[in-house]
Structure formats: structure tokens, C-alpha cells
Image (cartoon, grey):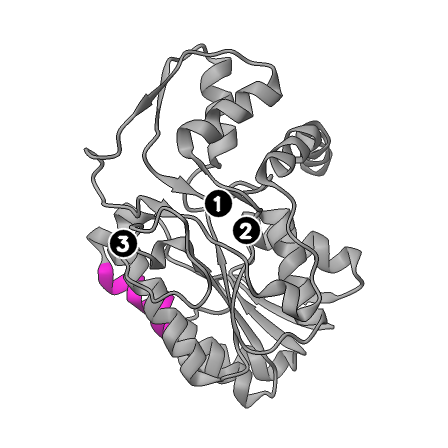
Amino acid sequence: MRLLLFGGSGQLGSDLAIVAAERGHELITPSHREVEVEDTASVEAVVAACAPDAVINAAAFHKTEWCEDDPGRAFAVNVTGARNVALASAAAGAPSMYVSSDYVFDGERAEGYVESDPARPVNVYGVSKAAGEYVVRLADRRSLVVRGSGLFGHAGSSGKGGNFIETMLAKAEAGDSMTVVDDLTFSPSSTRDMAGRMCDLLELEAPGGIYHVTNSGSCSWFEFAAEIFRQAGLSPSLAPRSAADDEVRRPRYSILLDTASAAVGMEPARPWQEAVGWYLSERGAVARERASAAR
């Protein structure tokens, strides 16, 4: 397949490039200088020139605090941009895939959320992503919405400065004492695994709709940190804290339950603990590859 990816510079985009290459797909990733998803004309021009078989929109304004401070920017990228990509894709006859978030939910259901549960976001970022989902599905009923949660990939997150695993390991190696939130529960998502499941959906020509593409299982951020340290063989000073005093409200429970992928022939996602183990085992190889590329 010939795939066009918007927002390919982050950790998910980097893993999509790897997975696409492994599966023999051609992945085209225009830079931010070449196209801005908020600009209708530039999106239309890129899609028309590419003539893709499918379009993936991973472009996002996603730092939660920044969204609260600049909701206009959040809606320009996450809603207007999402609509632009979906409409241009539909006009080119290509299905589109919009990357969304667990933050579309209010976090009041301890048992987690299935794909069809109504979106009730509690912060600006969540509102913008929920609105993005709606406009994408309105633009083209063939479109796919894929939701992730607590993403971690070797490329880090361009807008957030690394990822949670790397932050925890760096603090442990520095001998820092850490407190980590223990009252927010989510479904960790390896971006390599997400990329694979996203490609599965496109290869299987999954019907339009919403899909949860996280790893299986759930944990609090404190439990996530503890498992990282256990697998890494580290014993830093780690204590739980509450999210009550955080600057931005976040959903208390944002567990994403996958009830849709089996119907299109996909295997269950591996547990998040296995994905963490794989991530840690590959860190050295990734570091060596980056050092070699920099020389």
C-alpha cells in the first residue's frame, strides 16, 4: 500500500515508518514545513499529489497544559486539521485514519470504556480530540478512528520531551526520589504495537468506525513506574501521590477496552507488561543505531 502520514515526526510516526517498511508498504511523510493540517489548500494539494491508498492523521496539538492555555490552537489542529485531512482523503478515494485519545472520556467508569461509549471529556485536549473524531466520521463514514493511551516509543514524544519510561529511568539513574500519580488508571500503549495494529486495520480493510489499539491490561502511573523499575532491575525511591493538585483535570479511569478488532480478524494485543519488556530490551540497539546515524 501507498500510505500518506501526517504528523510523522513523533514516536508513533517513527514506529509507523518501521512497521510500514517491514510490511512492504510505501510511507510518505510530508514535513510540517511542507504542509500544515489546518491549511485546507496545502492538505488537498499533498493528498492529490500523493494519490495514496490510505491516509493516516497522527498530527496533534497534544500537550494537555498547552491546550488549556491555547484552545484555539488545539481546535485548529485537532478538529479543523482532522476535518481537512478526512475530506481531502475522501475526495481522493482513500480511507483515512485519525489517531485519537483516551482523554475523550470522563474517567468515571472504573471498568473502562468500549469503543461505542459516549465521549464526555473533562479538559480542552479531550474536547478537541472528541470533536476531531466527530468531524472525521462526518466527513467520511469509511474513516477509522484509533484511540491510544499513555504512548511510549523509542523515538520519544516530540512535543513532550521524551516519554514516561525514559523520564523514570533518567531519574532513577540520577538517584532522584520520585512521586508518581497512583489515582489515574489507563491502558499503556507501545507505539510499535499501535503501529502494527493500525496497519492491520488498513490491510484488513476494516469497516469505518472506532477502534482501541492499546496494549491489553491497565495500571496506574505509579504501577507503571514500579513495573518499569522491576523489569530494569532498579530500586529507586518511589512513592505514590494524588493527581488532585495537578494543574489540569484528567480522567480518573481511562482504560480502553478492545471489543472491535476481533471482528475484523485481528489477534488480541499483547499485555502492556510484555510491551515494556520489549521496549527495555531494545533500548541498547536503538541507542547504537542513533549514534551510528549521527556520525
Picture coordinates of residue 201 (x, y %)?
65, 67
The image quarter in which residue 5 lies: bottom right
Left or right? Give the position of 196 relative to 119.
right
Mark 3 surroundings: few (<14), some (14-19) or many (≥20) residues within 10 A: many
Give the residue type that dot 2 points to. Thr
- Mark 3 vs mark 2: in front: 2
Picture coordinates of residue 43 (x, y %)?
48, 77
> Quick one: 9 or 184, which is closer to the camera?
184
Q: Which of marks 3 and 2 is nearer the N terminus?
A: 3
Verify CB contact (< 8 Å) between mark 2 and mark 1: yes
Return the residue at label 1.
187
**Mark carried by residue 213:** none
**Mark carried by residue 67:** 3
Q: Can residue 101 be seen in this view?
A: yes
Secondary structure beneath disc 3? helix
Residue 74 located within the stretch drawn in magenta: yes
Q: Can residue 29 be seen in this view?
A: no
The image quarter in which residue 240 lies: top left
The residue at the point 54 percent across, 20 percent down is 229
User: The C terminus is located in which quarter?
Assistant: top right
Q: In the picture shown, does residue 106 fall above or below 138?
A: above
Mark 2 surroundings: few (<14), some (14-19) or many (≥20) residues within 10 A: many
Picture coordinates of residue 230 (x, y %)?
57, 19
Q: How far apart are marks 1 and 3 (CA)?
A: 22 Å
The residue at the point 71 percent across, 52 percent down is 18
Q: Distance between the residues labelled 2 and 1?
A: 6 Å
Return the residue at label 2.
214
Magenta span covers which residues? 71-81
The residue at the point 58 percent across, 55 percent down is 13
- Mark 1 vs mark 3: in front: 1
Picture coordinates of residue 244 (x, y %)?
20, 35
